[in-house]
C-alpha cells in the first residue's frame, strides 16, 4: 500500500510490506509534486516500482547484515559477505538450517564461525551435503576448523550417495575426546625431543615445531589447549623471559657479492680477465645445461592429482561420473595425459611456446604422456606446410609428442555422438544464418523446440549433402559462461579435407570437438589459455550429457608481448605490403622467426617459466625475453671476433718471429670449454668507432695520444700515423705494437686479421608503439606504426675464421658487440649473420 501526501512540495511515501512492517521514506525520497503533470501515470508507476524494488533490496541487505553480525562476524566482514550473492545465499541457508535444528534464532559465535568457514570453503560438487554438515556443526559434533576441513575433504573424495556415516565420522574425529592429561603427556614428550635446542635458543625457538609434534599423535586436540600447555611447560623449563629473550634475533648479513649473484638477472659484458656475473644457479643445472620448464616453474604448478577430477572447482558430478573415472584410470594406468591441440592454419608464435611448455612440460615432469593433436576441423584454411611447421617447432623446443593425432581421426565417432545428442534432446538443427548467430545477444532460434525425429532426419540430410552450405547448422542446447546461447556443433562446408577428402561435407566446431577428443584420448589435464574459461561449463556439460569420461580443464594466462603482432591475418598483411619478408622474418615473434634470429629454444622455455603460472592477463615487454636470451647464450654461445664497420690498421713493427696465430678462449669465463686460434698479422681491422682523433676525458679507446690493448693478442698498439684520402676520410691507421705489460692500457678492443667477409643484419623493433593494435594508441592502425628502419644491413662486415664451418642457426657472441646467429641465406662463399640481441639491454647506457 502506498500513501502520498503533499508536504512542502514533496511527497513523503509510506511503503507497507506484506509483513506489515512500514517504513517512512520522507527522509530518503523526494519527488517533485509536478511529476504528475510531467509524467504519464504509466511512467510514474514504473519509476516508483523501480524505486521500491531498490528499497526492498536495500532492506534485504540490511537484514542480511544484521543476520551475519549476529553469528559473530565483524561488521566489515559481514558487509563484504553481503556483496557476494553466492556466499550470502549459502551462509544464510546454513544459518537458517541451524536455527530450525535448534529451534532458537540465536547462534553461538563458535558455531557461527564454523558456518562462515563452511560457506567459504564449500565446493559445488558437495553443495547438496550442506544439511549434513550443518547438522554436525549445530549439534557440536564438529567443533573445530580441522574437523570441518577433514569433513569437507572426505565428502569431496566420496561425492556419491549414500554417505558412509561411520567412515565420515571417523575421518573428521566425531566423538573423539582428548583429555588434558593426554595433551600434557604429548607436550612433555615433544619438549624432551627438542630440549637441547630449546635450552640453547630459549624463547627464540620456533614453538610451532612442538605443536606439530603434538598434533601428529593427537590429531583432534584443540589447538588453543595445545598452545597453552606448550607455553606453560616452556615457562617451567626456561623461567621468565630475560632482556636477551625479548630482543629480536639478529640476522646474518650477506656479503654484497653474494647478494648480487642471487639477484642479478642479466649478464654483464665480459671484459679482459673478468668473469661475468650471472645468477646461473637460477636456470643452469649441475651439468651446465639449462633447466627444463617444469624444473624452473616447480611447485607453482598446482593442478589436480591424477584421478581427483571431481575435487576441482566447477567439476560436475553425475550418476556415472565415478564409474567413468574408474574406467579412465584403468585404461591409462593412472598416468597423466595432456595434449597440445593447435589449428594447422598458420605458424606458431611466442604465445604457443607457453602452451607447448605447459602441456609437454607438465606431462614430462609427471612421468606422463602428451599428444600433439591437430585440430583440423576447418578444411578451408589448413595446409600441409602448417602441419609440418608445427611439429618442427614443438621438437625444436625440446619436446617429442607421445603420439601425433588429428581431430579428423574421430569424425565418425563425433558424428555418432551428434546423433546421440539429438536423441537425448540436447541438440537441434537450426536454419538461422551465420550472420544472425554472431555476438552474445542472439535471439532464440524458432527451431529450438522442433521434434527430435525431425532434427535427426535433417542432420542426416546435412551429412549426405542434401542441404546447401549456410542453410543449416546443428546447435547444442546450452549457454556458454560468456552468455552465448546454443553454440554451433556442426556446420556445412563443401570443401575437401586434406585427410578425409570428400568423405564429409559437415565439420564439427571447436566447442563440440575439443572436449570429446580430450575424452577419447583419456586426457587427464586439459590445459588451455584463459579465454577458454568461458567454455569450461559447456566442456563439462557436453561430456556429461553424453555420459562419456570428462577430463578437467585448467586455464592459465595467455602470453602477450608489447611491440608485437601475432595475428595470422595481420602478419600476412605485413608480408603483402613488404614490411617483412616472410613468416620467419627475424623482426616477428613467430617461433620460426625467433629461431632464425638466433633465440635458443632453452631461452624461450626459460622466458615462459619466468612469466610463470598465472591467471592474470598481462602483456610482457620483449626486454624480459631478450634478457633470457642473453642469460642462455652467455653459457651456450662461443666467442668470436667480428668487425661490422672495419677500419684497416697496419702494424708497422709487427714482430718478425711471431707465429701468426693467436689462441682465443671459446668462453673466457670457463677455460675448460676450450679455445680456437685466429690469424694475427701486420694487417688487422678494428671497428671504426674504436678510433677517434679528438677525444674527451671519458673516451678510453684508441686515439693519437692513447694506446689500446688488442684482445687475446697480448699486444698494445699506439698510433703512428693517420692516413686519409683527399676528402679527409680516414682510410687506414699505421700503428706500433709492444707486448702488454703489467701497466695495462685503459681498454682492450677486438680486431680481426685475414678475416672472412660477411653480411650482418641488425634489427630494431618493428613497431614504434608498445601496443600497435590499440587504436587509442595508434589511431591509424598497426600498419601506420611500422618502423621502416627496423633492418640495417652491414654488407662489408668482417669476421674471424673460427666461424667458417658454422651451420645455419649456430649462435656466437661477437665480442664487445652482441650475440649473432648464422642465417639460412648463408652460402659457402658468403656468410650472413642475424643480430640476436645486444650484449646489454641498452647498448648506449655506458
Image: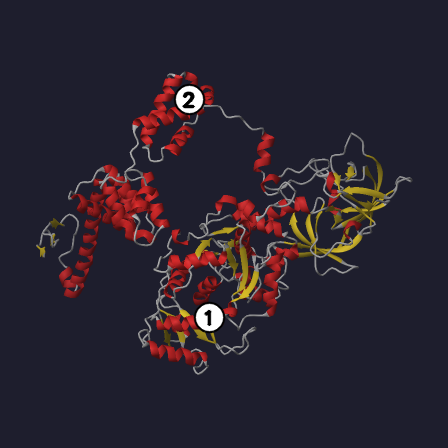
Q: Position of residue 202 (x, y in %)?
A: 43, 20
Q: Which residue is mark 1?
A: 413
Q: Position of residue 827 (x, y in %)?
A: 76, 60
Query: Is 109 placed above or below 689 here?
Result: above
Query: Is 152 placed above or below 696 here?
Result: below
Q: Residue furthest bottom?
A: 466
Q: Quadrant of the N terminus?
A: bottom left
For this rendering, which residue is in front, 597 or 728? Answer: 597
Query: Is 276 placed above or below 473 here?
Result: above
User: What's the mark number on residue 203?
Assistant: 2
Q: Is residue 121 left or right of residue 604?
A: left
Q: Is residue 510 visible?
A: yes
Q: Position of residue 717 (x, y in %)?
A: 81, 38
Q: Is residue 17 left or right of residue 254?
A: left
Helix, strand or loop at disc 2? helix
Helix, strand or loop at disc 1? helix
Q: Is residue 523 visible?
A: no
For this rendering, which residue is in front, 387 or 691? Answer: 387
What crowding class fits label 1: few (fewer than 14 Cα within 10 Å), some (14-19), or many (20 or more)?
some
Residue depicted at 8% across the width and 54% down the height: 6
Q: Is residue 53 left or right of residue 805?
A: left
Amino acid at each position: 500500500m502506498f500513501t502520498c501526501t503533499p508536504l512542502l512540495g514533496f511527497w513523503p511515501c509510506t511503503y507497507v510490506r506484506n509483513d506489515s512492517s512500514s517504513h517512512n521514506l520522507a527522509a530518503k525520497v523526494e519527488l517533485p509534486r509536478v511529476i504528475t503533470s510531467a509524467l504519464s501515470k504509466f511512467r510514474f508507476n514504473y519509476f516508483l516500482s523501480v524505486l521500491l524494488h531498490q528499497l526492498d533490496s536495500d532492506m534485504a541487505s540490511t537484514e542480511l547484515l544484521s543476520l551475519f553480525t549476529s553469528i559473530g562476524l565483524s561488521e566489515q566482514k559481514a558487509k563484504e559477505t553481503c556483496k557476494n550473492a553466492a556466499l550470502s545465499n549459502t551462509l544464510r541457508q546454513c544459518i537458517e538450517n541451524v536455527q530450525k535444528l535448534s529451534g532458537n534464532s540465536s547462534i553461538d559465535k563458535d558455531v557461527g564461525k564454523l558456518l562462515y568457514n563452511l560457506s567459504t570453503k564449500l565446493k559445488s560438487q558437495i553443495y547438496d551435503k550442506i544439511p549434513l554438515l550443518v547438522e554436525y556443526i549445530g549439534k557440536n559434533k564438529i567443533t573445530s576448523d580441522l574437523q570441518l576441513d577433514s569433513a569437507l575433504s572426505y565428502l569431496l573424495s566420496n561425492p556419491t550417495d549414500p554417505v558412509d556415516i561411520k567412515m565420515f565420522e571417523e575421518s573428521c574425529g566425531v566423538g573423539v575426546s582428548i583429555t588434558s592429561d593426554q595433551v600434557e603427556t604429548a607436550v612433555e614428550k615433544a619438549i624432551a625431543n627438542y630440549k637441547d635446542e630449546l635450552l640453547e635458543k630459549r624463547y627464540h625457538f620456533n614453538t610451532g615445531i612442538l605443536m606439530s609434534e603434538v598434533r601428529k599423535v593427537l590429531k583432534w586436540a584443540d589447538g588453543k589447549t595445545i598452545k597453552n600447555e606448550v607455553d606453560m611447560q616452556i615457562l617451567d623449563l626456561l623461567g621468565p623471559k630475560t632482556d636477551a629473550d625479548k630482543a629480536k634475533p639478529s640476522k646474518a648479513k650477506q656479503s654484497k657479492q653474494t647478494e648480487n649473484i642471487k639477484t642479478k638477472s642479466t649478464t654483464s659484458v665480459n671484459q679482459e680477465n673478468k668473469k661475468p656475473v650471472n645468477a646461473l644457479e637460477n636456470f643452469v643445472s649441475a651439468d651446465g645445461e639449462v633447466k627444463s620448464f617444469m624444473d624452473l616453474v616447480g611447485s607453482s604448478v598446482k593442478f589436480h592429482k591424477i584421478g581427483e577430477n571431481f575435487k576441482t572447482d566447477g567439476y560436475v558430478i553425475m550418476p556415472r561420473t565415478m564409474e567413468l573415472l574408474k574406467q579412465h584410470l584403468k585404461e591409462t594406468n593412472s598416468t597423466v595425459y595432456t595434449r597440445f591441440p593447435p589449428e594447422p592454419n598458420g605458424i606458431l608464435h611466442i604465445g604457443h611456446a607457453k602452451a607447448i611448455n605447459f602441456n609437454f612440460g607438465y606431462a614430462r615432469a609427471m612421468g606422463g604422456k602428451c599428444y600433439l593433436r591437430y585440430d583440423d576441423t576447418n578444411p578451408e584454411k589448413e595446409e600441409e606446410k602448417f602441419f609440418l611447421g608445427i611439429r618442427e617447432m614443438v621438437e625444436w623446443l625440446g619436446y617429442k609428442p607421445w603420439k601425433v593425432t588429428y581431430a579428423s581421426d574421430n569424425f565418425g565417432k563425433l558424428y555418432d555422438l551428434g546423433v546421440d545428442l539429438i536423441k537425448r534432446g540436447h541438440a537441434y538443427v537450426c536454419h538461422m544464418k551465420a550472420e544472425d548467430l554472431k555476438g552474445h545477444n542472439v535471439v532464440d532460434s524458432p527451431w529450438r523446440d522442433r521434434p527430435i525425429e525431425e532434427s535427426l532426419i535433417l542432420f542426416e540430410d546435412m551429412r549426405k549433402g542434401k542441404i546447401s552450405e549456410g542453410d543449416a547448422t546443428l546447435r547444442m542446447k546450452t549457454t556458454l559462461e560468456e552468455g552465448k546461447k546454443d553454440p554451433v556443433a556442426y556446420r556445412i562446408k563443401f570443401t575437401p579435407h586434406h585427410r578425409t577428402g570428400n568423405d564429409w561435407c559437415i565439420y564439427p566446431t571447436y566447442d563440440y570437438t575439443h572436449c570429446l577428443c580430450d575424452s577419447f584420448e583419456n586426457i587427464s589435464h586439459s590445459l588451455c589459455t584463459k579465454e577458454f574459461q568461458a567454455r569450461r561449463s559447456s566442456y563439462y556439460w557436453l561430456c556429461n550429457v553424453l555420459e562419456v569420461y570428462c577430463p578437467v580443464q585448467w586455464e592459465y594466462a595467455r602470453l602477450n608481448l608489447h611491440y608485437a603482432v601475432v595475428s595470422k591475418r595481420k602478419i600476412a598483411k605485413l608480408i603483402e605490403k613488404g614490411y617483412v619478408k616472410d613468416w620467419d622474418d627475424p623482426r616477428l615473434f613467430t617461433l620460426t622467426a625467433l629461431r632464425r634470429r638466433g633465440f635458443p629454444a632453452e631461452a624461450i622455455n626459460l622466458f615462459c617459466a619466468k612469466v610463470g603460472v598465472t591467471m592474470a592477463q598481462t602483456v610482457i615487454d620483449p626486454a624480459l625475453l631478450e634478457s633470457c636470451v642473453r642469460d642462455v647464450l652467455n653459457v651456450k654461445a662461443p666467442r668470436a671476433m667480428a668487425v661490422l664497420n672495419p677500419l684497416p690498421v697496419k702494424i708497422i713493427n709487427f714482430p718478425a718471429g711471431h707465429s701468426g696465430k693467436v689462441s682465443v678462449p671459446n668462453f673466457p669465463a670457463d677455460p675448460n670449454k676450450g679455445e680456437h686460434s685466429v690469424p694475427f698479422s701486420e694487417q688487422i681491422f678494428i671497428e671504426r668507432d674504436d678510433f677517434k682523433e679528438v677525444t674527451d676525458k671519458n673516451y678510453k679507446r684508441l686515439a693519437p695520444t692513447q694506446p689500446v690493448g688488442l684482445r687475446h693478442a697480448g699486444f698494445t698498439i699506439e698510433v703512428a700515423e693517420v692516413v686519409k684520402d683527399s676528402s679527409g676520410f680516414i682510410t687506414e691507421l699505421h700503428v706500433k705494437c709492444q707486448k702488454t705489460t703489467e701497466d695495462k692500457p685503459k681498454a682492450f678492443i677486438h680486431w680481426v686479421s685475414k678475416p672472412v667477409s660477411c653480411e650482418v643484419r641488425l634489427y630494431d623493433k618493428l613497431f614504434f608503439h608498445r601496443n600497435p593494435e590499440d587504436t587509442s594508441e595508434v589511431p591509424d592502425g598497426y600498419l601506420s606504426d611500422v618502423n621502416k628502419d627496423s633492418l640495417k644491413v652491414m654488407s662489408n662486415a668482417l669476421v674471424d675464421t673460427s666461424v667458417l664451418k658454422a651451420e645455419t642457426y649456430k649462435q656466437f657472441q661477437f665480442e664487445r658487440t652482441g650475440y649473432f646467429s648464422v642465417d639460412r641465406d648463408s652460402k659457402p662463399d658468403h656468410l650472413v649473420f642475424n643480430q640476436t640481441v645486444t650484449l646489454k639491454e641498452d647498448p648506449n647506457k655506458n
